[in-house]
Image (cartoon, rainbow, N blue to C red):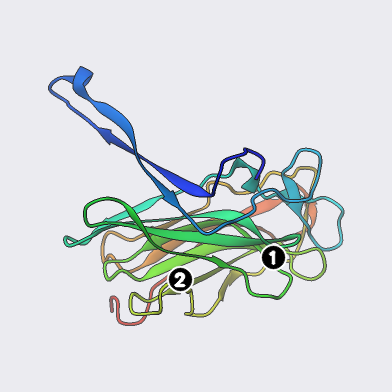
Amino acid sequence: GPYGAPFDAINMWEFSVNFANPGLSTFVNSAQLRVPEFDSAFPCGADGRSCIGQPTVSQKIDVLSYRQRPAWRRAYRNFGRVQSLVTNQSVEARPGVAGVRWYEIRRPSNPTLFQASTFSPNDGVNRWMGSVAMDKFGNMASGYSVSNSTSVFPGIRYTGRLQTDPKNTLPQGEQVLIAGTGSQTGSPRWGDYTSLNVDPRDDCTFWYVNEYVETTGQVRWQTRIGSFRFPGCGS
């Protein structure tokens, strides 16, 4: 990336609140976790963000990977014996193709990087602007946008892993939440507040919100909310 850091890492910050005496509250950089190398700078427009191609139009849409930060949101779970934090960001998985880099950070005592990988099947499809979450059994899901310049209109897909799956993998198969059928013109802006959350009623059902395009036109994106869960979690 463009910021000149000596290596790729996640900086962990901890905020300890003292409600009785706010002046004694602390906000400290508690850890710097080295992660597998990634490239967040795409070879795209002068603004550094209009990078994702769409079929039938010249307008490209936001990748936002240049900000080099994990995307909304960082999902925290406390399983008693261990605490877990999962997050993701958009990266250049291969030349000109975006992928979803995801991380799980665990804390039995000090924060450590437990697993990480980039989800990017070799099919020429951009996967980016993602969000990740974890259910009560430690199964993890990842939702994201998809598009390319030839045949895949901006749409929404998801995948995931069971807690028992091999580390550093999302092997549960990619699913289509909704396929796009049009391209956006007039603006590169895209859904950086996409969010995947677990339903508190059963702690199993994932709810995902993102945007897609149904009909080609100027800023004609639409919102889709969908739900799913892994087998063996919930009824």
Q: Which residue is mark 1?
A: 180
Q: Position of residue 195 (x, y in %)?
A: 47, 53
Q: Which residue is mark 2?
A: 168
Question: Residue at the location (54% across, 57% down)?
Answer: 130
Q: Residues within 10 Å of mark 1 (few under 14, many from 20)?
A: many
The answer, for residue 223, to whether it is visible in the render is: no
Which marked residue is nearer to the observer: mark 2 or mark 1? 2
Question: Residue at the location (45% across, 47% down)?
Answer: 10
Q: Indicate left or right for 17 with 67 as reference.
A: left
Q: Position of residue 123 (x, y in %)?
A: 71, 75
Q: Position of residue 28 (x, y in %)?
A: 32, 32
Q: Amino acid at mark 2?
A: Asn
Q: Residue furthest left?
A: 20
Look at the picture and state if 22 lies above or below 124. Answer: above
Label 2 or label 1, whichever comes before in sequence order: 2
The answer, for residue 38, to whether it is visible in the render is: yes
Q: Secondary structure at mark 2?
A: loop
Distance Cα–Cα, label 2 vs label 1: 29 Å
Q: Amino acid at mark 1?
A: Gly
Q: Indicate left or right for 182 with 111 as reference.
A: right
Do tag 2 and tag 1 residues touch (Cβ < 8 Å)? no
Number of dots carrying numbers = 2
Q: Position of residue 196 (x, y in %)?
A: 44, 58
Question: Residue at the location (64% across, 50% down)?
Answer: 40
Q: In this rendered view, identify the residue nearer to me: 152 or 219.
A: 152
Res. 152 image quadrant? bottom right
Look at the picture and state if 72 lies above or below 86. Answer: above
Look at the picture and state if 74 lies above or below 172. Answer: above
Q: Residue furthest front?
A: 6
User: Could you tell me which quadrant the C terminus lies in?
Assistant: bottom left
Res. 98 image quadrant? bottom right
Which mark, by number, is residue 62?
none
